[in-house]
Image (cartoon, helix red, strand yellow):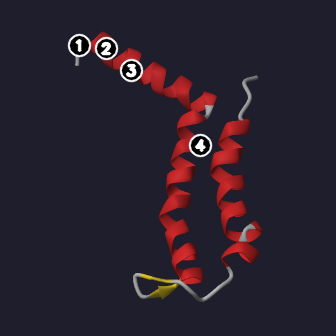
Amino acid sequence: MKSRIWTVIFSLIIPYAAIVVAFPLYNRAEPFIMGFPFIYFWIFAWIPLTSLSMYIGYRLDPLNAEVHDESDATHGAKGE
């Protein structure tokens, strides 16, 4: 079985660490970024970054890579 550790790291551990574990580092009101206190900016920024992190984990997953390779081979055989 191929290792799926990178999927877990990118999909779960990085967003969790950035929001929960790093809370003491970003728990402050100043500076203001785009009109938001830094704590709100940090949390709002991680909404799309979590999606990006999950996409990276999906692409690194060896089981998903096999599915993409098979679909590429099938499309190439049809001449599309």
Q: CA distance from mark 2 to mark 4?
A: 26 Å
Q: CA distance from mark 3 to mark 2?
A: 6 Å
Which kind of residue does numbered mark 4 sit on?
Gly
45 left or right of 17? Answer: left
Question: Who is closer to the viewer here, 28 or 45?
Answer: 28
Residue 76 lies, in percent from the top left, at 31, 14
Residue 12 lies, in percent from the top left, at 69, 54
Question: Who is closer to the viewer here, 5 or 76?
Answer: 5
Q: Earlier in the sequence, mark 1 or mark 3?
A: 3
Position above or below: 52 against 1: below
* Residue at x 68%, y 38% (from the top left corner): 6
Residue at mark 2: 76
13 left or right of 66? Answer: right
Residue at mark 4: 57
Query: Helix, strand or loop at disc 2?
Result: helix
Q: Earlier in the sequence, mark 2 or mark 4?
A: 4
Which kind of residue does numbered mark 1 sit on?
Gly
Residue at mark 3: 72
Residue that lies at the very extreme toward the top in this rendered image: 77
